[in-house]
Image (cartoon, rainbow, N blue to C red):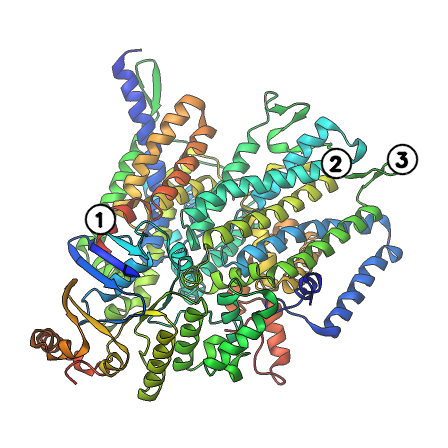
Amino acid sequence: MNALTRFLRRLEGPQTLGRGPLFWAGFLVTLAAACAYPLFSDGYTVGNTVYFFTWIFMALGLCLIWGYGGSLSFGQTAFFGIAGYSYGILTINFGAAYGFTFVALVFAVAVAALFAALLGYFLFFGRISGVFLGIVTLSVTLVLERFMAQTAGPEWRIGAARLNGFNGMSNMPPLTLPWPGGDIVLFPDVELYYVVLAMLVVVYLGLRILVNSPFGNVLVAIRENPERAEMLGYDIRKYQLGTFVIGAALAGLSGVLYTSWGQYITPSSMGMTAAALPIVWVAVGGRSDLTTTLIGTVTVLAVFQALTIHGSQYALVVMGVMLVLTVLLAPSGLIFALARLVARPFTKRLPGDA
Amino acid sequence: MDVGTLAFSALYQFGDAFAFLVLSACGLAVIFGMMGVINLAHGEFIMCGAYVTVSAAHAGLPLPLAIVLGALVAGMVGALVEIVVVRHLYDRPLDTIVATWGLSLIGTQGTLILLGSTMAGVGTPFGSFQVGAYSYSLYRLVLFVMAVVVLAGLYALFNWTRFGVMARATIQVPHMAAALGVDTRRVYSLTFALGAGLAGLAGGLYAPTMTLVPTMGTTFIMEAFVTVVVGGADVFLGTAPAAALLAVVKATMTSWYGQLFGQIGLLVAVIVVIRVLPRGISGFLLRERA
Amino acid sequence: MPLIETRALNKRFGGLHVTNNVDLALETGEVHCLIGPNGAGKSTLFRLILGEHLPSSGAILFAGEDITALKSFQRIRRGMSVKFQVPGIFKALSVRQNLEIAMQHHYEPAHLAEEIDKLLAFLNLAADAGRLAGNLSHGQKQWLEIGMAISLKPRLLLLDEPTAGMSPEETHATGEMIQRLNADGMTVLAVEHDMAFVRQVAHKVTVLHLGKVFAQGSIDDIVANEDVAAIYLGQTTAHATAHQQPGGLHA
């Protein structure tokens, strides 16, 4: 067995649900359906679907940090916001020519990751865990929100980019693919859909490989019993920090895609309410697995969208109720609870039990 | 400006910051210190206290009574929340945070739906007084006195009353307390209600000084979290000194660079403190007793 | 040169002097048992050696190197390994995965599965490889953790009451396993209550009492020592339950 096949075999393993031909057949059918979807729809609806997709990266990042690593970060929207604003500042200043928007994407995600590395160093090397990790990350997020909200004055500008306080920053160029014969501007439409879908597939499969790798083994070991993990010779602080940075980078990717999708970003996308939403998506589906997180996120977002017709405050109340009920009645997530209910007559045990 | 007025100004800033930190944090700290639970709906209990206070004041109740009513109502809501939700999650602290966050969403958005985006406030009582060239709000001094009164009251409650002794016994050795006939469930309910009531009191006390919006809780929670994180799990050895320390940081930063930098100063202080004292000030003071 | 050595080790918690000037030295290849009544400071000494607590004063040397300031994982990487009293396993993961996590950096990826199979067979857990570790019997959990500890191929194996909750047969089998590991060169330091087990494995015994080294010598010396019996008996009168401990000294 050479290194590459060993690498690819990690697409399935003990840390991910779904293995064998049946699962991958289902995966390919879903992917094919997702690819064919724009053929049966109009550009506007497809563009709205992309909006759903942009959030999934942040959810998968939180799934990695919380579901696999056992650390609960409430600060994912901080990284989302930092990357979103960074993208805006970079592209407003340097434009969209020569594929620079993708360079800006990489830089913006890197800025978010760097910030996470700095914060994470203090947290994890200070051995902060459990509830304290949650409150500190949330405090940081709230301060960032307040900071951005008071940058309305004209003195708050970076180059040509006004931060614009509470109203947020807008009119940055969308992602633009350089193409012979004219750049393709990725407005919320079919082209952007395929780009984001491709990113999603890459990230999903990449994370599957990561969590089934030795790194992922240590990650779940830390979740289960940090002391034992350390006593096997692992510097758990480094693993926690690494996970935190990866999760933050994914939140940052969401931030960039969101910003380029709507060509705006506001401080409230980081605030208390916004910060609660990733927790809802991940908790409701089933935080301990990438696939359930993915399905849960899409489902909750669809429900949210449907409810927003009656007003977004109603939708948020429903989100809150969903969160409370999930925690009380199905702590490992609704998909696991449903699976257990369906599978009860057939099998004795499912992953995620215990 | 002479040294006297300068000193008064600094003291006033400090007292104002100290009162805000203590009053915002003590409800959260009681629940965290006694039960190990972080209540993310803390801000909504504050909002609840403020709304009840202002409604009662509009209905003609004198302000002090209205504030007491606000605290009581918040406390009762807290007891209800404990019975319906929190009680079932004591063995899962992270899930408690998540569930109380859900409650916070419901609280904020529900208030928005039912009562609209803002509510007419009541004016700040007592007016102002003059020291040197500056005028100061007398009500802010009242708030400082109230913060001290609350701390003293909590000290008396936990050391001199039957409830306090039972609560401390329950926290230290739950099964032993239960074996001695203490109804530990009731102690937890009452402790949670006390924490929520203190949050409501903070809301009621600050209601005359701010605009009433459903998201007003977020104005308090960051300060509350920060104080609890820096202080650690003990209200007296933790929250009070943490509030004093942070009040110095906040007052200094605010008077030099403005409100926002006061908050950033707080945050930096927190990150430094957790790196040096991971279990907060009280953890440091108590470390040798482990 | 001793493999592990503590020099004038002290640990105070407030007014409590839990570890009082402890000098302990294990030569390579030694099986050393640490005994003493409850509250003698055995567990604290263990945690000091592991780096979970930092000493108030004194030094710890491993193979001649001063490791007093090192973090736990750094000590493990230098060749220590531990089995805790309460089984420290990853309950929600399978038995195989538990071992994989312990062993993945010690073997070539291509040979890892094979090595895990070998260890599973050695631990009598081959049939349970796919079960969740949390669903094993208590004895099996102990074995699994011992397996995780020895899979690191440590020079020094620390065992905190390895036979707690085991039947006499399981205890004896554990003793045999330790003897086999020792024959391959592993040095062992064990906290143990079960005197039959101590008699079976120990080359040398140290008695801790009130944080101090009270007596040291061969098992026969210790059993013959009337002062040692007295501290256990004192314990017995003070705490009526102490004599129920499996295989207490006077039993």
> The numbered mark 1 sits on a residue in which chain?
B
Task: Please say whether residue A263 is visible from this viewpoint.
Answer: no
- Circle 1: is it few (<14), some (14-19), or many (20+) Cα within 10 Å? some
Q: Secondary structure at mark 2?
A: helix
In front of the other: label 3 or label 1?
Answer: 3
Residue bearing mark 2 = A101
Residue bearing mark 3 = A182
Residue in the foreground of this view, choosing between C10 and B118: C10
Q: Are marks 2 and 3 on the same chain?
A: yes
Residue B136 in the image, given as x and y percentages of width and height: 34, 23
Residue bearing mark 1 = B155
Residue C222 in the image, given as x and y percentages of width and height: 14, 76
Q: Are marks 3 and 1 on the same chain?
A: no
Q: Residue furthest right?
A: A181
Residue A85 in the image, given as x and y percentages of width and height: 64, 35
Asked if labels 3 and 2 touch by Cβ distance under 8 angstroms, the answer is no
Mark 2 vs 3, N-terminal side? 2
> The numbered mark 2 sits on a residue in which chain?
A
Residue in the foreground of this view, choosing between B148 and C228: C228
Q: Amino acid at mark 3?
A: Gly
